[in-house]
Image (cartoon, coloured by chain):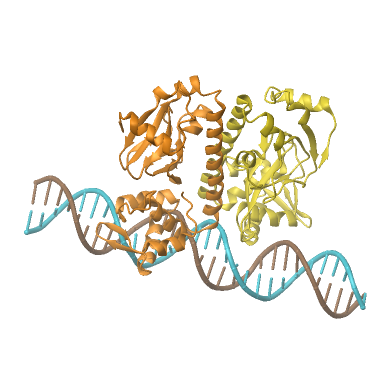
Chain colours: A yellow, B orange, C brown, D cyan
Amino acid sequence: MKEIKNREQLNSFMRAYKIDCLFNPQLMPHLKLYQFNRGENICSQGEPSEYLYVLVKGKVKVFTTSPEGKTLILSFKTPLELIGDIEYVRGTDTVNTVEAVSPVTMIGVHQRWLKKYASEDSAFLQFLLKIITDKFYVKSNSLRFNLLYPVEVRLASYLLSVSFDESNSLLTGQHSAGSLKDAANLIGTSYRHMNRVIRQFCNEGLVDRNSKGILVKDREGLRRLANDNIYE
Amino acid sequence: MKEIKNREQLNSFMRAYKIDCLFNPQLMPHLKLYQFNRGENICSQGEPSEYLYVLVKGKVKVFTTSPEGKTLILSFKTPLELIGDIEYVRGTDTVNTVEAVSPVTMIGVHQRWLKKYASEDSAFLQFLLKIITDKFYVKSNSLRFNLLYPVEVRLASYLLSVSFDESNSLLTGQHSAGSLKDAANLIGTSYRHMNRVIRQFCNEGLVDRNSKGILVKDREGLRRLANDNIYE
DNA sequence: AAAGGGGAAGGACATATGTCCCGGCAATGG
DNA sequence: CCATTGCCGGGACATATGTCCTTCCCCTTT
């Protein structure tokens, strides 16, 4: 993570997403712009939550780790989205880990200033409400999707999510074996079973396997299989 | 549903849950107290959402119906809880069906008055935020639970939820065959498989099967099996 | 170059869950 | 009282997924 000290850029993001009116004047000086590299963690489960972030560019994945050490994917998010909102409202430690899957830009503000200047600000509260409510709605769908569809569909959906960012440009299309292990954990299945499904995808010409990992070949085919993408 | 025209009772509920300060004076005259019978629907998926309800007594179950006609349980709720909050914030039709599983008392207020008198009220907005955020948190856990545990555990959990109300008093302990069919849909499995699991429960002495349906025999045993109850 | 180590893919088997269907029992109507 | 209908429990089989373990390949070390 590194801070981008560019006031003009920060303002232009706020104008682009029409969020400049959400932060009252006293809050403005405490807004900062941050850049995260691909693979970097924005926040980690269990750690104290200090900042509220507004995702304005790039894509992140949100996942949780169970007591037994299994990880489970919760969602992928693209702008406009909030990170750390639940923790801010509940006053708890970070609930889920958030990782950048493409280069990510965020507006960050320390909870201290929000408590001081925004906790009575109805425009800001309404914005929080809207975002959290939408998140809740998405999670409801995700729950349904996960219980109703087999690993095959979830994997297709996962591959689409990590291969393309919010502008739909190809990120890599290439997934190393290491990241595949993650992927298995993330969609809630065993590595073994995932291999089975990958093999099936190879036979169907959807992806290709090489010494480096696997490569997405037929994006449209995957999309057809995934129907509706759960993870975003 | 029937309205209970008892101002004193309404006020005593509000005092008991310390929510009297949430509704500003203009809103007060528009609060009504409603009673729902066991089995009655509070709201139904797809219908326009008009009221925000505050659950102050009893227990409800929340479930969703997929395009293919499968129903899936989302949660059980006990006081203090809101019904219709997501719909109010998003301005959408009812997302999930909510049904009373015990006699239920709710405070209801039409969205029209909320929009008029409460949309800038930061105390009320903060309350909404808190409740919805908690809901979101619970749903995250539920998602994890559903993906990590087999039908056996979910069924035990379900039986506990529908057999006992919020004061933990026994509701019926008896589940008719008809309601079992629902149960299967609700926990996201086939009726056939549920029967298998019930048979297993019988062998283990957890429940008993008779001509009328099944009867919970060993509540503690079920609780042990369910670990942590997902549905509430 | 030979030997060893580590990780990844896939075989073999076990378990969980779904689908189809049949036989029995109870309610209903004649 | 008997025949019909419909629902329910459970058998048989199919499919999805998990677990364990062996084999193979690549890389490092000697």
Which of the image's four quarters has the N terminus of chain A?
A: top right
Q: Quadrant of residue A203?
A: bottom right
* Most foreground residue, A27 or A226: A27
Asked if residue A216 shows in the view, the reply is yes
Percent of width and height locating residue B137: 56, 45
Q: Dividing the picture into quarters, in which one does residue B212 lie? A: bottom left
Q: Nearer the viewer, residue D30 or A47?
A: A47
* Residue A203 visible in the picture: no
Q: Nearer the viewer, residue B204 or B10?
A: B10
- Please identify the quadrant where the C terminus of chain A is shown: top right
- Residue C16 horizontal/vertical position (percent): 49, 62
Horizontal placement of A189 versus B219: left or right?
right
Q: Give the camera-side residue of A196 and B134.
A: B134
At which x and y percent is residue A102? Answer: 76, 41
Q: Is residue B95 above or below residue A217?
A: above
- How many marks on residues? 0
The percent coordinates of residue A104 (x first, y second) are: 76, 38
* B6 displayed left or right of B85: left
Taking the image as shown, residue B149 lies to the left or right of residue B29, namely: right
The residue shown at (55%, 51%) is A150
Name above or below for residue B119 compared with residue A58. Answer: above
